[in-house]
Amino acid sequence: MEADFPHSSTTAYVQQQPLELAKAELTGLLHAVRTQGTLENRQMKDMRILSGIAALGFLVLIATCLPVAASQAGGAQCKGSDSVSVQINDYLDSLLISDDSGNVAMRDTVGIAGVQPSQVIIITDERTCSRLASAIDHLEGVNRPGRMVYAFSVGTRFAALDLSIKAGEWVQLLFYDNHYKLLWSVGVF
């Protein structure tokens, strides 16, 4: 390449130019570098300002959304006492006192054979409802934030119901042990 273009290097090109032309070129180059540097500095300053505004906007967004998320998470997973919880409670009471051989076998399997109807208590404890909701998520293979469950303690076991969990037309009442392991599922209504 050097043979084809003997003056290909910048040094050789500048040496051929008259001194004044080289000075002017160098001055122009220095001016361009200074201007470019100043432009870059302005752009950097603008970027810092924009980054600061974006960070402030993000903090405002977080501060606004956090109370909403906290209020939804805090107690939002427990359904309280209502007509559905009364139906579940009635079902559990009848299950505990039934002489039906299927119900007796189920009570034995679940571990609630000696439990009295007075030991069926609706749960509103956020931690327990959250764990039951997570167990139902695991059962379904999904993560459904804000899942609403009806939860009852039945002696040392839990009964949980999410109205969206169905087998065919039947809403499923799920029985869990105290480690949130699924023990039994039954269609109730």
Image: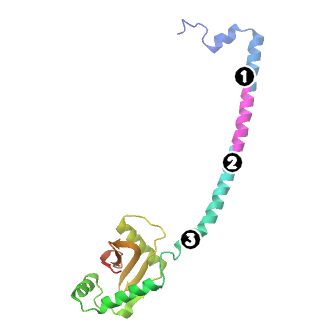
Residue at x-position 68% and y-position 51%: 52
Q: Nearer the viewer, residue 133 or 187?
A: 187
The amino acid marked with disc number 1 is Leu
Coloured how?
A: rainbow
Looking at the image, do the residues carrying marks 3 and 2 touch, with CB atoms under 8 Å apart? no
Residue at x-position 38% and y-position 91%: 119
Figure check: 176 above or below 112: above
Q: Nearer the viewer, residue 24 or 135?
A: 135
**Main SS, magenta residues:** helix
Q: Residue 146: where, in percent of width, then height?
A: 48, 70
Q: Secondary structure at mark 1?
A: helix
Query: Which tag, 3 or 2, sits closer to the chain's start?
Result: 2
Q: Residue 53: where, in percent of width, then height?
A: 69, 52
Residue at x-position 66% and y-position 49%: 51
Q: CA distance from mark 2 to mark 1?
A: 31 Å
Query: Which tag, 2 or 1, sits closer to the chain's start?
Result: 1
Label number found at residue 145: none
Q: Nearer the viewer, residue 109 or 88?
A: 88
Looking at the image, do the residues carrying marks 2 and 1 touch, with CB atoms under 8 Å apart? no
- In magenta, the rendered stretch is 32-46
**Residue that label 3 marks:** 70
**Residue that label 1 marks:** 29
Residue 38 in the magenta stretch? The answer is yes
The amino acid marked with disc number 3 is Ala
Q: Residue 60: where, in percent of width, then height?
A: 66, 61
Q: Secondary structure at mark 2?
A: helix
Residue at x-position 76% and y-position 25%: 31
Label number found at residue 50: 2
Q: Nearer the viewer, residue 189 or 55?
A: 189
Give the quarter of the image for residue 116.
bottom left
Image quadrant in which the C terminus is located: bottom left
- Res. 122 visible in picture: no
